[in-house]
Amino acid sequence: MYKTHGVACQIFSQRSAINLSKVVTMDSLSIKQPWSQIGKQAKSVNELGVDSPYLFGFKRETYLYMSAHKHKVHSQLLAIINSKKNDADKALSLMTVYLRIPGLGLAKAGFLCQLTAGLVGCMDTHNIRRYGIDPNTMKLDKTLKSRKGLESNKRKVVKYIDMCHDYGTENMWNSWCSFVATKDKQAKELWQDANHVSEVHYTYLTGE
């Protein structure tokens, strides 16, 4: 699943700044929303832009930020993945870039790394429960400005990256898709199987 659809999302993300902006929007829309609903929400944003009713609160801020900075963020993405850094350092650099985007915390910045570069992963509410993770370890204080505070946040980011890479980016993708395919009772008639859950990551982006 991941090797087909995850890689397809990465190629799509890297192809252009506009594509990357769509990936960030999908990532943001998925916050506290059923995965089965993200396709119609992404379609609404594609058609209505900032006037989409699904761009509320911080999701609107995310969209506006990417509208203004998509070329810069895309250039940073390409520079990082094409660098000679190892995967851990690439992941830290990417997380640093993505955490500057308003509205994204550790989980969704990690999801964005997974979608754009095949690194890190998304420890969302489902995975926190499944893996028995303390949700307090997932919280960053973005108001911190002191050196000590910034270093504390960086340690949390590094710990998050290490945790996701220990579980395995590919494994996290595949196991999450299998979980959603069986647990999403409201959408059980929508999901054919785990492969279908995986596939829509790409079709939500392309409209195919």
Image (cartoon, helix red, strand yellow):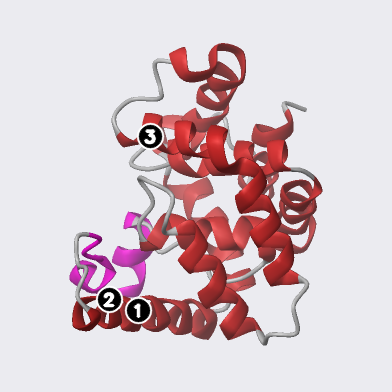
Mark 2 lies on a secondary structure that is helix
- Quarter of the image that includes the C terminus: top right
Mark 3 lies on a secondary structure that is helix
Q: Which residue ends up furthest to the front in the rendered image?
A: 146
Q: Give amino acid for label 1.
A: Lys
The residue singled out by tag 3 in the image is 61
Q: Give amino acid for label 2.
A: Leu
In terms of secondary structure, what is the magenta stretch mainly? helix
- In which quadrant of the rendered view does residue 196 lie? top right
- Mark sitting earlier along the chain (3/2): 3
Between 98 and 55, which is closer to the camera in this rendering? 98
The alpha-carbon separation of the residues under discs 3 and 2 comes to 23 Å
The image shows residue 45 at horizontal and vertical percentages of 54, 21
- Mark sitting earlier along the chain (3/1): 3
User: Residue at 73% across / 62% down in the picture?
Assistant: 78
* Callouts 2 and 1 close, C-beta under 8 Å: yes
The image shows residue 113 at horizontal and vertical percentages of 57, 62
How many neighbours does mark 1 have within 10 angstroms: few (below 14), some (14-19), or many (20 or more)? some
Q: Is residue 15 left or right of residue 49?
A: right
The residue singled out by tag 2 in the image is 150
- In the image, residue 112 sits, relative to residue 46, either above or below, namely below
How many neighbours does mark 3 have within 10 angstroms: few (below 14), some (14-19), or many (20 or more)? some
Q: Is residue 135 magenta?
A: yes
Mark 1 lies on a secondary structure that is helix
Q: Give amino acid for label 3.
A: Glu
The residue singled out by tag 1 in the image is 154
The alpha-carbon separation of the residues under discs 3 and 1 comes to 23 Å
User: Residue at 63% across / 55% down in the picture?
Assistant: 115
Range covered by the magenta-colored residues: 125-142
Between 16 and 111, which is closer to the camera in this rendering? 16
The image shows residue 141 at horizontal and vertical percentages of 21, 64
